[in-house]
Image (spheres, rainbow, N blue to C red):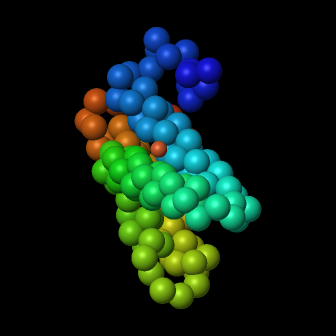
Amino acid sequence: MGFDQYHEPPEELPAATRTFARLCASLTEEAEAIGWYEQRLAVEADPDARAIMLDAQGEEFKHFAMDLEFLLRRTPKWREIARGVLFQPGDIVEHGESAEAAAGDEGGESDSSSTAADATGTLGIGGLRELAS
Ligand SMILES: [Fe+2]
C-alpha cells in the first residue's frame, strides 16, 4: 500500500512524475470516497448521521476538485480536452469527441508538446501521457 500508483521503479522516475502520480492516486481516492458517501447516504435514515455524511462528502468534492485542478495545470492537453467537456450543456460524448479532435489527439500519435512533461519543463519523456489518460 502507498506505492501502488507507480508502474515503473519509483527511483527511476523524476520527482515531477512521482508528484503527478501521487495526485492521480489522490484523485482516484477522492472519487471513491464520493461514491462511498453516496451509497451510505442512500441507505442512512438518521438525519444527524446524514448531515455528517453530507458534510464529509462536500469535503471530498473539494478535495477531488483541487486534485483535478493541479493535474490539469500540469497537463496542457488534458486541460484543453477538459475545457471542452466540463461545464458544457448538451451531449457529453459529442463534447468529448470534439475536444479530443481540437486537441489534435484523434490519431493517438504521441505529441510531446502537450504532455505534463512540457508543463513542468523537467521531463523529456512521453510516459506521462499514459498516466493522464
Ligand atoms: Fe478527501
Provide residue 114's location: percent of width, then percent of height.
Answer: 37, 50
Residue 132 seen: no
Q: In the figure, 76 relative to 106: above or below?
A: above
Q: From the viewer's perspective, is 112 left or right of 30? A: left
Q: Of 29 and 108, which appears nearest the observer?
A: 29
Direction top: furthest residue:
11
Q: From the viewer's perspective, is 20 left or right of 100? A: left
Q: How many marks?
A: 0
Provide residue 58's location: percent of width, then percent of height.
Answer: 45, 58
Picture quadrant of residue 47: bottom right
Provide residue 123's location: percent of width, then percent of height.
Answer: 34, 30
Direction left: furthest residue:
121
Q: In the figure, 20 relative to 115: above or below?
A: above
Q: Residue at x 31, y 51 (%)?
A: 73
Q: In the figure, 7 relative to 107: above or below?
A: above
Q: Of 86 and 99, which appears nearest the observer?
A: 86
Q: From the viewer's perspective, is 18 left or right of 44? A: left
Question: Where is the N terminus found, in terms of image quarters?
Answer: top right
Direction bottom: furthest residue:
90
Q: Of 35 and 26, which appears nearest the observer?
A: 35
Q: Residue at x 51, y 55 (%)?
A: 52
Q: From the viewer's perspective, is 133 left or right of 84? A: right
Q: Residue at x 38, y 22 (%)?
A: 14
Q: Residue at x 46, y 57 (%)?
A: 55
